[in-house]
Image (spheres, grey):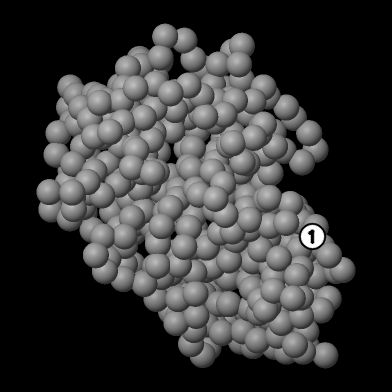
Amino acid sequence: MTQTQSAHRSAGTVAHLRPAYHVRPPSGYLNDPNGPIEHGSDVHLFFQSRPTLDLHVPVEWGHATSTDYVRWTLHRPAMAPMPGGLDTDGCWSGNTVLDDGRIRAFYSGRVEGRPYQSVLTAVSDDGGASFGPARQVVPDPAEAVMFRDPFVWKENGTWWMAVGAGYVDRGASIALYRSDDLENWTAAGPLAELPRSRTGEHDTGSAWECPQVLTIDGRRIAVVASWSPEGGPGEVLSFDSDAPPVPQRVDHGTNFYAASAVRESRFGPLLFGWLTEGRDRPGWTDGWAGVISLPRVVWLGADSSLRSAPVPTIDTLRMDSPGAQCEIVVSEGSGRVVVHFSDEEYLIFELDADTFAIDRSHASLSPFAHGGRMEVTDAFDPASGRPAVRIFIDGSVVEAFTSAGRVLSTRVYPTTPPPWRVEAPANSQHWGLAP
């Protein structure tokens, strides 16, 4: 038995692919989320962005705020490169902390021709709308494959800083520093290191970028983005940093990278991520690329892997008449969901025993759209109280969360605009979502 639902037609042939309730500027290139933080009743989210798709343009820190983590207001960039300064060619990734009520950023400053991005800090005196002059806080390394992306947090009265790194003889690494005042930092040895390994499941990388450190169940959990000089970005991995690293994937889809954490929020520890394009560069004909994932509440599974669920406030976006923005929920059991974009374009979600899969082999007629099938096992936990799967579609964005906390993020590019048809089991519901 199936249910079907039509949707209102979006104008144009490309407009339906643009995300509506995920964060991104109206145009230009977006990548890593940076420094999400709660300040009073507001949530501030910063992110790497360029006003155009020209990747030679130096990166700025874009800025968005929210009161509920799901409805966002975009602002002008909060940080821009200083000509001739330590970040003259880009304000790259980092995070933010509260320092005597002010928002302080730690980030990587890029200067063309230098082998590393220097670790910089800058302070906002206007609640995160802008940041003052930057200064370097730790020296550049003598030798490294990579060194960038500071993450600062306070633990038991001491400030700590993790910096992503990699070394030819030591492998991927997280450099660790400590401070009593956020001004003076002392090297405290590596937080974790791991020689590169490549298996069918993941590539641990020759270096780790965008390190994040969460405290869950009394354990320091590191979240890293694996990276290699020849292949660039790899996968987001997590592991217990107080033990020999056993990395496990954080997202089992194809397009989640550069996670950024909130250690403490009204919902507990959270992660954001950059949802990469899932289409070849010639297909970027509509003036924008890149999007920020939904914020995710995270916890540890029985196997110590990081599990995820969307923030609870996502439910407040539900409305009638699903279109290119919708949520599909399957409450329990096996079966499949098919989103029919047209007779020739369709996206399949499969629930089978302990496995959940997404097949986008037929999701687009565009020659530039990526396809293929992705899956994860240990996907369902009937005792959790969560639906078997929650599927979020926002134009070209797809994020699916299972009852066991597995998540798969991907991108699809149907050439056919709504109305679309949803074919799903009887024990399912679907809604439109409107920010």
Which residue of the protein is positioned furthest toward the right in this rendering?
353
Crowding near the residue tagged with mark 1, few <14, some 14–19, many ≥20 C-alpha atoms within 10 Å: some
Left-right relation of 112 to 230: left
| Residue 248 placement: quadrant | top right
Residue at 67% x, 46% y is 249
- Among the 4 quarters of the image, the one containing residue 366: bottom right
Where 310 falls versus 365 (above or below)?
Answer: below
Q: Please, what is the three-letter code of the amino acid marked with disc 1?
A: Asp
User: Residue drawn 39% across and 76% down?
Assistant: 435
User: Split into 4 quadrants, where in the image is the N terminus?
Assistant: bottom right
| Residue at the farthest front position | 156
Can residue 342 be seen here?
no
The percent position of residue 344, horizontal first and vertical second, equals 74, 68
Observer-nearest of 175 and 402: 175
From the viewer's perspective, is 414 left or right of 211? right
Residue found 26% across the figure and 60% down from its top:
39
Of 178 and 320, nearer the camera is 178
Residue 233 shows in the view = yes
Q: Position of residue 358 (x, y in %)?
A: 73, 62
Q: Residue 116, image x and y in percent?
A: 39, 19
**How many numbered tags mark residues here?**
1
Residue identifier under label 1: 378
Secondary structure, mark 1, is loop
x, y (%) of residue 156?
38, 44
Location of residue 127 by image quarter:
bottom left
